[in-house]
Every structure is written in structure tokens, then in C-alpha cells.
Image (spheres, rainbow, N blue to C red):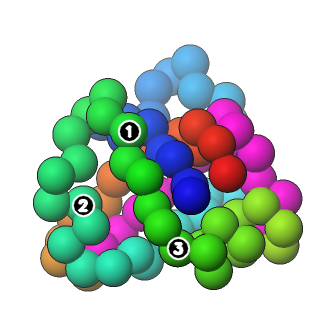
Amino acid sequence: KLYLNIETKHSKDSPKTLRQYRFFIEEGSLNEAEPGSILALHDPDLAHQLSKVLRLQAGDQVTLLDNSGRACHCIIESL
């Protein structure tokens, strides 16, 4: 499982990164997403991409899009 903390926007205090990672997830997955909530994704391919290929860790930021016009800026809680 992949756990992500939903943010409203990137704050000035957020660590600056050279890359902004954006991922499309299953349509409708962000319908219940609220700022401050935890989103659990059951996508082994995405978890593999984040942890093994990109070597992201807890605390890193990603943006999730679900093809419905919603984009959520998230902080990885755990992989």
C-alpha cells in the first residue's frame, strides 16, 4: 500500500525539489480527497515506480491526477 497525505498547496516551507513528479491514478480516486486527509492507494505498479525506480521516500512530494480535472499535491507518508 501507498499512503499519501493530501496538501492544499505547496507551502513556502516545503523543501525545494528539482523535479516535480506527476502521476495519473484511477479515475475517481481523488473524489473523497480532502486537505489533511490520508489517501491509501492499492497500486503495486505505482508503489514500485515511486520506491524502486525513482527512489522516493517518506516526506517526498508528488502530484496525483485522476483524469477528472483534479490534482492533489501530496506528501508520501509510507511506501
Do the CB atoms of the residues marked 1 and 2 lie less than 8 Å apart?
A: no
SS assignment at label 3? loop
- Which SS type dominates the magenta stretch? loop
Say which label, 1 or 2, has the lower sequence index. 2
Marker count (numbered): 3
Q: Is residue 50 left or right of residue 2?
A: right
Q: Where residue 19 appears, x then y in whole percent?
A: 69, 58
Q: Residue at x 61, y 75 (%)?
A: 44
Within 10 Å of disc 1 (Cα), the crowding (few <14, some 14-19, many 20+) is some
Q: Is residue 78 left or right of residue 64?
A: right
For disc 2, the marked residue is 30
Q: Amino acid at mark 2?
A: Leu
- Picture quarter with the N terminus: bottom right
Distance, label 3 to label 1, CA atoms, is: 15 Å
Q: Where residue 18 appears, x then y in whole percent?
A: 74, 52
For disc 1, the marked residue is 38
Q: Amino acid at mark 3?
A: Asp
24 and 47: which is toward the camera: 47
SS assignment at label 1? strand
For disc 3, the marked residue is 43
Say which label, 3 or 2, has the lower sequence index. 2
Q: Residue at x 35, y 69 (%)?
A: 65
Q: Residue at x 69, y 39 (%)?
A: 58
In the image, the segment drawn in magenta is 54-66
Distance, label 3 to label 2, CA atoms, is: 14 Å
Do the CB atoms of the residues marked 3 and 1 lie less than 8 Å apart?
A: no
SS assignment at label 2? loop
Distance, label 1 to label 2, CA atoms, is: 11 Å
Within 10 Å of disc 2 (Cα), the crowding (few <14, some 14-19, many 20+) is many
Residue 43 sits inside the magenta stretch: no
